[in-house]
Amino acid sequence: MLKEGQVRIPSGCAIAAIIDKKGERINGSEIIKSIALMHDRSNGLGGGFAAYGIYPEHANDYAFHVFYDSAQSRKECEDFLFKHFNVDVSEKIPTRKTEKIGLGPDIWRYFALPNKVRMSESRLDEEEYTAQCVTHINTSIDGAFVFSSGKNMGCFKAVGYPEDVGEFYMLDQYEAYLWTAHGRFPTNTPGWWGGAHPFNILDWSIVHNGEISSYDANRRYIEQFGYKCTNQTDTEVITYLFDHLIRHHGLPIDVAADVLTAPEWDEIDNMPAEKKEYFTNLRAIYSGALVNGPFSVILGSNKGLLAINDRLKLRSLTAAVKGNRAYFASEESAIRIVCPDPDEVWSVSGSEPVFIPLELDEKEGSAK
Amino acid sequence: MTIEAGLMRYEKLNEMIKDELQRKNKVVISNVNGQRYLGCAVDEGKTLELHGTPGNDMACYLNGGKVEVFGNCQDAVGNTMNGGLIIVHGHSGDAMGYGMRDGQIYIQKNVACRGGIHMKEFENMKPVLVIGKNAGSFLGEYMAGGTIVLLGLGLKRNEKLFGTHCASGMHGGKIFVRGSFPKENLSPNIKVSSLTDEDMKELSSYVKKYCRFFGEDYSDIMSKPFKKLSPATSRPYANLYTPN
């Protein structure tokens, strides 16, 4: 056994993303190629992907992806799901046997819409009803874990290197207009299937490189509004913050990004009056939602792709555009391997969130 | 001698380079895709030419050798370099010249965050970082010695010469900046002054080299005035936690 200092692990998580603004679909092998190039940034204890636009034939249904530890947990969860939703399809998520991914949970998928009677009795809107049902399963049904609950999108994650996770889930069989990916190097928390990125609730998915040093302050804030942090890792809290700020408070995505990455007070002091008032208000109203890094984070959604860095810029993130497509990755080489000749390529700075909106036609259904 | 890097593992590629450089003075690597530590600790008289996108910690501990890149670099170029020359025909990621002790880095375009962080000098060892376009936030953070030159070539109207927290914690060395710069991004305790004759002599030797490497016009660059940024105190954080 090597002692501390005798072994060097050159890593620190990897994130990557690709979006086609006009909704042209991209095969999963592209994002695998990008994240695989940064193999050395992760250590095999977690990899995952989020894909948007993959279920056009079920575009209006919620797609639940669920891990089960046992037949019993599946029975309990399905009893609950079939009672609260009209389930159109229930199936095992197809996987490819690969020796690189160890024995894991049973993985199921359900396309479903809320049961109308129960929903109207609950007096909740469709999204809140669905989100509360997901929270209920994840906190109350032992061994059942909903890790994806959006429409026309899905998360795929496991313990392993990301390129092996992509092979395991056969992502070369999926076409999406927005992909995000993560290679994990867990530092403070266990590497388990549910703890791999992306973290998801409804349409929102988060991949993250870094740590949230404000985690407990953020968790206490968000749990006041009915969210429960169940994943044994810090990143999930960012997912809930975005869901809360955008869905409950109706903030535009760029304003929500400003809440999480608001500048320091001495920078605010030097701003022109209007901007100063804006950030002062954000920091006063949403002090519990201010996130301290180090982090680079990519938010995937059916509205588009958002990339943010912590205020002090302690994690690297590169962006590039080529025609209708935008690319993000922890390293520039991981962009160039799938887009050798970008129109523009730059390092995302700590104070300027980058948002690439989806501009889908109405008939595509999912853009709101 | 050209080695095609492709998707080769960085361990193997670095072994091959080391092997070649024992027998030859120059090695060319094509199609580089993020392999790390290329040019690590290369000695004086040896040259590495890289085409593509080298990975993190390129030319770390460079020991007098020369590394020339045709493409963009990632993070921590020239990490703790000891001496030698790095020329980048492109831009670089974060923490370029991290803790460099001697030698020179010339970068044609911009550096991202924390360029020249904790550069240091001692007696005859004086590191130099020359940046053609502009720099992100925290340029020269904790800088303890050496020289950074920021030329501001090809800046667009909405682009600034450097980002926020420039020279934060700087307590040694100097930064030469060309043309107007965003004073609001400069940290407290940093002095802005005119260049002395000695400074001008030093600067002109770096600018001449920049022009030679990247085909720019020397008198064009020197036609705009330069200013010198230097620390007003050697202990900027002396009173951070206690009043005295």
Image (cartoon, coloured by chain):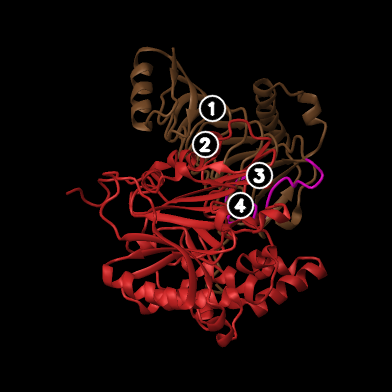
Give the residues in magenta: B156-174
Residue found 37% across the figure and 27% down from its top: B14
Amino acid type of the residue tagged 3 in the rendering: Ala
Q: Chain B takes which shade in the image? A: brown
Asked if labels 2 and 4 touch by Cβ distance under 8 angstroms, the answer is no
Q: Chain of mark 2?
A: A
Quarter occupied by the N terminus of chain B: top left
Position in image of residue B209 (x %, y %):
65, 24
Asked if labels 1 and 2 touch by Cβ distance under 8 angstroms, the answer is yes
Disc 4: which residue = B138
Q: Within the magenta stretch, is there residue A263?
A: no
- Label 3 packing within 10 angstroms: few (<14), some (14-19), many (20+): many
Disc 1: which residue = B52
Question: In front: mark 2 or mark 3?
Answer: 2
Disc 2: which residue = A333
- Kindly identify which numbered label has been placed on residue B135: 3
Asked if labels 3 and 2 touch by Cβ distance under 8 angstroms, the answer is no
**Dot 2 lies on which element?**
helix
Q: Compare marks 3 and 1 and give the one earlier in the sequence.
A: 1
Most extreme residue toward the left is A1
Q: What whole-number distance in Å separates the C-alpha atoms at marks 4 and 2?
A: 24 Å
Q: Is residue A101 left or right of residue B211?
A: left
